[in-house]
Image (tube, rainbow, N blue to C red):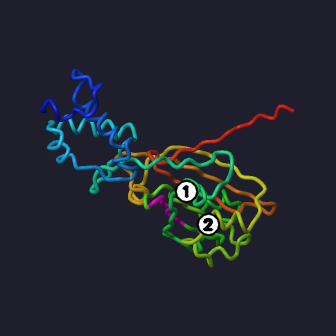
Amino acid sequence: MTSNALNFSPDADPSEPLYKQIKRLIVSRIDSGQWKPGDKIPTEHRLVKELDASRMTVNRALRELTQENILVRRQGSGTFVSPARLETGLLEIRNIAEDIVNRGNEHSCKVLVLEEVSLQEEMAALMGCPITSENYHSVCLHLENGTPVQLEDRYVNKALVPDFLNQDFSRQTTGGYLLSNIAYTHAEHKISAAIATNDQHSSLELSENEPVLVLQRRTYCSNGVITVVNLYHPSSRFEFAGTFIPDRN
């Protein structure tokens, strides 16, 4: 490496390992806005030439930045700046489209499945319905500025929401439709991390070995369970958060 290849800061420590200098250079380009969230960065080969560094050194810098969720590597596509994480409420039911729009970004949705199905034993128990009873099932992929952030796998009580299959969920979310059309009394949910299936890995454009964050929510009204939904999120692009205010009365 030439002496001027990484001379991007007057405070640079020449004794600092070269891979760390490269990491700081990449982060500085992101922080300055030169590379924006979701942007594809130059290839490893191009960075080797630009920085006059060894392939091993550049690879280590990229690998560590990926582990730190600053970069995302997508097999067959390249390396990208990680999108800013979408934060969703932990203590309330919110419409993901509104969350994305409120961040100043664009929401879009791909409807992958919209069908009537016979419930199998596990889902029938969650829905509080007889086994093989007919209910509705949808699978939707939610994107923020074209980047997948949530894969939604939902079952809906046909008796409580009879018009569900007649909606255009590419224009409104399933959750937004349900919130607008049936009042819920309470909900319960659990959060876990899981190894992604092949379909989830492909749909969510996960990096290699990236786990998914899973929120399972069951929502009730006075007549029973309205919906059971499993929401799958890329761990590098999503986080849950909530504020708890104790009752001191």
| Residue occupying image coordinates x 21% and y 46% | 44
Residue at the disc numbered 1:
100
Count how many numbered circles sit on residues in the image.
Answer: 2
| Residue occupying image coordinates x 26% and y 31% | 21
**Of pointers 2 and 1, the one earlier in the residue sequence:** 1
Helix, strand or loop status at disc 1? helix
| Residue occupying image coordinates x 67% and y 39% | 243
| Quadrant including the N terminus | top left
- Judge whether residue 140 is colored magenta: yes
Relative to 37, residue 11 above or below: above
62 or 225: which is nearer to us? 62
Helix, strand or loop status at disc 2? helix
Percent x, y for residue 217?
64, 53
Percent x, y for residue 188?
69, 49
Relative to 238, residue 158 above or below: below
| Residue occupying image coordinates x 58% and y 68% | 137
Relative to 112, residue 214 above or below: above
Span shown in magenta: 139-145
Q: Is residue 180 left or right of residue 76?
A: right
Q: Check whether the beta carbons of the residues at disc 2 and disc 1 lie within 8 A of each other.
A: no
Q: CA distance from mark 2 to mark 1?
A: 15 Å
120 or 49: which is nearer to us? 49
Residue at the disc numbered 2:
174
